[in-house]
Image (cartoon, rainbow, N blue to C red):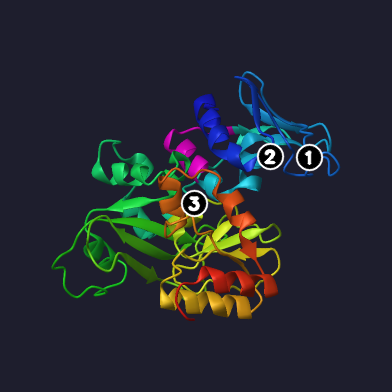
């Protein structure tokens, strides 16, 4: 087992593990994601990743769960597991330690890179030289490196899209590079993608749908049983845990309880104001940012230096009558 790759992915997984602590180079401690650890004491952490000189194994001293690192990774984050699986595949690592014994693993490419997936023909941001303008663009927006594998670069977007949707763009005049953001389902299969312009090309966002029955960005990682957030832009969703994006201004989904809609912060935009009024009228919980926050969206807020975006959102979330009262002071135009 390639210990270097394991350590890399332990680091990438760590934000998803509560009370995560590195004890030393071969020992990590956190709350068990299988049993949830103690419900009475939120500081108790009895899950351990231990390096046994060959590979990492997981052991919980509460529920007694015992497994290998790759199984833990798959349980917590299937998208990251696919990326790990692919990296191991590339490095020709053919063995893992299972629950029973060491056995051969048929490492395969992630679902979104299998078969005729168009993503095979472009590169992830994580695969590019850090000196390329596209990588600098991503970093300038404070998108953490642990998400770079979810973003792709395409130097001729129109031409590339035409390879899997013939004649989608009849004219290639003005073709240009774009950031490609794949929309993946629970099986990590791509059902849509969004191309984000790097320059002044219009429209700034181009959304291409392959399956109209699925709509949300983030289906590959969302936990419907936990508190979740809904934003408009896929990039904004990367700054919040358990968040999906609609890729349009109507943030309403088929669930209301334990769901917070986070619209763009545009109190002078009449269309946005009307949308937010409809969210409140439909009894959704809605975030209305305070007046001292002047930035339009989450990415702009983070780029300006704001760090605890989740706390800001939670402290400014309203529902029902309270939302209606706050909305009337927040908006700067008639709804």
Closer to the camera, 5 or 245? 245
Decide: marks 3, 2 in contact (CB < 8 A)? Answer: no
Q: Does residue 201 show up? A: yes
| Mark pair 3, 2: CA separation | 18 Å
Q: Which residue is drawn at 60% across and 47% down?
A: 77
Residue bearing mark 3: 238
Which label number is shown at residue 42?
1
Decide: marks 1, 2 in contact (CB < 8 A)? Answer: yes
Q: Which residue is drawn at 48% across and 50% down?
A: 110
Residue 146 magenta: no
Choose top left, top right, bottom left or bottom right for residue 175. Answer: bottom left
Q: Nearer the viewer, mark 1 or mark 2?
A: 1
Which label number is shown at residue 322?
none
Give neighbour class at mark 2: few <14, some 14-19, many 20+ (Cα, 10 Å).
some
Residue 84 magenta: yes
Residue bearing mark 2: 18
Decide: marks 3, 1 in contact (CB < 8 A)? Answer: no
| Mark pair 3, 1: CA separation | 25 Å
Q: Is residue 182 above or below residue 70?
A: below
Q: Is residue 11 above or below residue 160?
A: above
| Residue numbers of the magenta segment | 83-95
| Mark pair 1, 2: CA separation | 9 Å
Who comes first in sequence, dot 3 or dot 2?
Answer: 2
Quadrant in the picture for the N terminus: top right
Question: Which percent across, then down, holds residue 241?
Answer: 58, 51
Question: Which percent across, then down, holds residue 42?
Answer: 78, 40
Closer to the camera, 61 or 143? 143
């Amino acid at each position: 087992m390639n210990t270097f790759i394991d350590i890399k992915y332990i680091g990438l997984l760590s934000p998803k593990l509560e009370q995560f602590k590195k004890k030393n180079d071969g020992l990590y401690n956190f709350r068990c994601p299988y049993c949830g650890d103690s419900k009475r004491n939120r500081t108790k952490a009895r899950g351990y990743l231990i390096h046994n000189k060959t590979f990492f194994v997981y052991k919980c001293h509460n529920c007694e769960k015992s497994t290998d690192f790759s199984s833990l990774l798959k349980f917590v984050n299937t998208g990251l597991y696919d990326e790990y699986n692919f990296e191991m595949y590339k490095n020709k690592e053919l063995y893992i330690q299972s629950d029973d014994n060491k056995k051969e693993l048929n490492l395969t490419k992630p679902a979104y890179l299998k078969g005729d997936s168009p993503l095979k023909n472009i590169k992830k941001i994580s695969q590019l030289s850090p000196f390329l303008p596209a990588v600098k663009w991503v970093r300038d927006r404070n998108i953490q490196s642990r998400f770079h594998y979810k973003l792709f670069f395409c130097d001729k977007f129109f031409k590339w899209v035409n390879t899997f949707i013939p004649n989608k763009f009849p004219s290639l005049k003005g073709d240009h590079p774009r950031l490609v953001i794949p929309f993946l389902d629970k099986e990590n299969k791509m059902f849509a993608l969004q191309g984000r312009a790097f320059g002044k090309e219009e429209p700034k966002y181009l959304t291409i749908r392959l399956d109209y029955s699925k709509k949300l960005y983030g289906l590959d990682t969302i936990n419907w049983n936990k508190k979740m957030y809904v934003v408009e832009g896929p990039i904004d969703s990367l700054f919040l845990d358990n968040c999906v994006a609609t890729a349009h201004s109507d943030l309403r989904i088929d669930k209301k309880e334990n769901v917070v809609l986070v619209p763009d912060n545009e109190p002078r935009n009449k269309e946005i104001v009307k949308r937010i009024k409809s969210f409140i009228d439909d009894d959704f919980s809605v975030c209305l940012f305070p007046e001292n926050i002047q930035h339009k969206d989450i990415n702009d807020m983070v780029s300006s230096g704001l760090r605890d975006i989740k706390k800001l959102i939670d402290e400014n979330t309203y529902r029902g009558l309270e939302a209606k009262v706050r909305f009337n002071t927040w908006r700067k135009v008639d709804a």
